[in-house]
């Protein structure tokens, strides 16, 4: 007998499917085994009902061909036992028999048979029927696997899943939904929503939604908020219609997902966007969203006002129409932003009328939600600030000129006072001393020795006053400065200072050639004078160094001590200005020089003045 070919895509010959053939007739048994075996099926023969049951227990077949008339257990009894056992109940049974009565066919189907083949056998019929039921078996197994997988997914899902019949009663509730309620999952089955303990108003809303889905046959999505011990929680629920074979809605599946975190993030994002929009619209600075190529996507009202353009005109103008491209700083600014991702600096803006004005720009690059590189620009018109800085610089220069002029007048006044002291008071004291000496001689000659000591005391007092006036004259304007130069004057001054204070001072340096101008020399002398006074008052040391150096392009005066030192940042505050330091600074600046102080607590101080030649 030639086998009937089976199509290549027919999975009924899958080797994983085997067929148990049960018949007490050896001829029938061999015939069926050959037909099915040659078609590619795995076939197991059994010649009795008892052997068939043992074979099934050993290994369940995919399909059973079962003869009805057999000694011992007949086919009906074997089928009945198979269907009574939960493990073997699902195995499809095709009855084979010579009996053709309607009664036998109906009995076969009532016992759980899936088909009925009458003898004598026809190969084509057997293969078609067996192939059909093998396919149905595979489909059923796939459906069972899918259902098992679905149930496992549903049971382990964090989403709240429930199924309702058209009477609005529970057909299924997963573990997450049961945990959210007050019952076990199995206790929900058959109950309406209201019967599960849900508040009446909430139950009515949900039942109305399920009815709507049943009526319209379309998915319904809603978002609800619920009060929990952890606070307000938000859930997105999808009500999905499930259809029967005739197209009616047979049940409704509800899937509720906790979206509290995403809802909070959305709310935060919305709030952030609203804040950004408010900042964008109400900023006093011009704010623009741009692309790397210089095109402009958005501009706020302040930008429109600053450049005298509408937002549309700003978009059309682009960066090149707002920022002066001839400004050499622009190229460096773009390079810096490309390298570092941000830039802050001053450039030149262009008004609608063509006038140019200084601006301060802060620009940075960022990626938008689509990953596209974008840029932002915050522009501030600094015309008023620049003008104020110019005015301040001008006022500062005027103040410096006034300060310099005052210093000159002060030195001139000191010179005049010293000259007056020398010419008038000095000469008068000298004459007084001479007169007292002459009177003393007459007193001694006439024997008036008793009053001689008084003349001695008067002469000593005149000498002391003369010395003090000379010191005052020297401090007002040292005569050595003009005659011998700055180095000699510093040595003369420090020697006198050592005698009066005990501070040991070393002076290093040669006389400057060519000789310094009187204004420069006097400025440096006054700086040294003030610095040494500060050493005496504040340094708590008994040693200082004064160094005067002549370099190729400048003269450098340094006064150094190893005293207590201080924090230079605290010496000139608005609340506690140190006028001595300010005076030294201004004296150096007045002659075109520079002044600096370096000091550390407990590590001494260095005062330095540099005057360009």
Image (cartoon, rainbow, N blue to C red):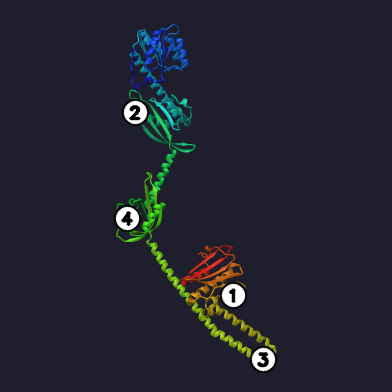
User: Does dot 2 land on a helix, a strand or a loop?
Assistant: helix
Q: Name the residue under label 2.
A: 215
**Nearer the camera: disc 4 or disc 2:** 4
Q: Which residue lies furthest to the front in this view?
A: 2
**Nearer the camera: disc 3 or disc 2:** 3
**Where on the picture, by quarter, is residue 494?**
bottom right
Q: How crowded is mark 4: few (under 14 residues within 10 Å), some or many (20 or more)?
A: few
Q: Name the residue under label 4.
A: 320
Q: Which of marks 4 and 3 is nearer the N terminus?
A: 4
Q: Which of marks 3 and 1 is nearer the N terminus?
A: 3
**Nearer the camera: disc 4 or disc 3:** 4
Position of 428 relative to 510 (above/below): below
Marks 3/2: CA–CA distance: 146 Å
Q: Is residue 367 visible?
A: yes
Q: Which mark is residue 430?
A: none
Q: Mark 3 points at which residue?
A: 443
């Amino acid at each position: 007998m030639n086998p009937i070919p089976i199509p290549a895509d027919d999975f009924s010959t899958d080797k994983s499917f085997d067929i148990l053939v049960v018949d007490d007739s050896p001829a029938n048994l061999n015939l069926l085994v050959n037909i099915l075996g040659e078609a590619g099926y795995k076939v197991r023969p059994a010649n009795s009902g008892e052997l068939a049951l043992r074979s099934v227990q050993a290994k369940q077949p995919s399909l059973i061909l079962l003869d009805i008339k057999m000694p011992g257990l007949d086919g009906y009894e074997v089928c009945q036992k198979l269907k009574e056992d939960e493990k073997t109940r699902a195995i499809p049974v095709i009855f084979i028999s010579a009996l053709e009565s309607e009664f036998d066919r109906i009995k076969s189907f009532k016992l759980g048979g899936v088909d009925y083949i009458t003898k004598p056998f026809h190969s084509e019929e057997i293969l078609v029927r067996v192939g059909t039921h093998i396919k149905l078996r595979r489909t059923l197994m796939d459906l069972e696997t899918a259902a098992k997988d679905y149930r496992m997914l549903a049971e382990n899902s964090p989403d709240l899943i429930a199924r309702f019949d058209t009477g609005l009663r529970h057909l299924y509730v997963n573990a997450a939904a049961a945990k959210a309620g007050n019952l076990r999952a199995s206790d929900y089955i058959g109950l309406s929503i209201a019967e599960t303990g849900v508040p009446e108003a909430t139950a009515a809303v949900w039942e109305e939604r399920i009815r709507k889905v049943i009526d319209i046959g379309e998915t319904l999505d809603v978002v609800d908020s619920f009060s929990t011990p952890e606070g307000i929680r938000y859930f997105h629920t999808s009500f999905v219609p499930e259809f029967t074979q005739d197209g009616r809605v047979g049940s409704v599946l509800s899937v509720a997902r906790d979206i509290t975190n995403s809802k909070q993030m959305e709310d935060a994002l919305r709030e952030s966007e609203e804040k950004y929009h408010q900042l964008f619209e109400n900023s006093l600075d011009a704010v623009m969203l741009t692309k790397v190529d210089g095109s402009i996507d958005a501009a706020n009202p302040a930008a429109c006002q600053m450049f005298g353009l509408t937002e549309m005109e700003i978009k059309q103008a682009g960066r090149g129409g707002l920022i002066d491209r001839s400004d050499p700083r622009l190229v460096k600014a773009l390079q810096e932003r490309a390298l570092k991702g941000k830039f802050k600096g001053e450039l030149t803006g262009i008004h609608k009328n063509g006038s140019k004005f200084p601006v301060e720009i802060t620009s940075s690059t960022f990626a938008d939600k689509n990953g596209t590189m974008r840029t932002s620009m915050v522009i501030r018109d600094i015309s008023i600030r620049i003008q104020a800085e110019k005015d301040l610089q001008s006022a500062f220069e005027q103040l410096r000129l006034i300060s310099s002029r005052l210093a000159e007048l002060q030195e001139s006044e000191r010179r005049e006072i010293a000259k007056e002291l020398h010419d008038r008071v000095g000469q008068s004291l000298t004459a007084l001393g001479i007169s007292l000496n002459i009177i003393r001689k007459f007193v001694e000659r006439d024997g008036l020795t008793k009053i001689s000591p008084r003349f001695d005391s008067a002469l000593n007092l005149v000498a002391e006053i003369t010395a003090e006036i000379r010191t005052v004259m020297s401090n007002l304007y040292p005569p050595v400065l003009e005659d011998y130069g700055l180095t000699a004057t510093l040595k003369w001054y420090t020697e006198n200072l050592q005698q009066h204070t005990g501070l040991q001072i070393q002076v290093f340096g040669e006389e400057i050639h060519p000789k310094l101008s009187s204004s420069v020399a006097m400025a440096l002398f006054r700086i040294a004078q003030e610095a040494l006074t500060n050493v005496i008052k504040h340094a708590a040391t008994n040693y200082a160094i004064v160094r005067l150096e002549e370099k190729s392009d400048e003269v450098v005066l340094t006064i150094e001590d190893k005293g207590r030192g201080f924090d230079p940042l605290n010496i000139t505050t608005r609340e506690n200005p140190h006028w001595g330091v300010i005076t030294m600074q201004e004296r150096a600046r007045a002659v075109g020089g520079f002044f600096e102080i370096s000091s550390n607590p407990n590590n001494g101080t260095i005062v330095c003045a540099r005057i360009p030649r």
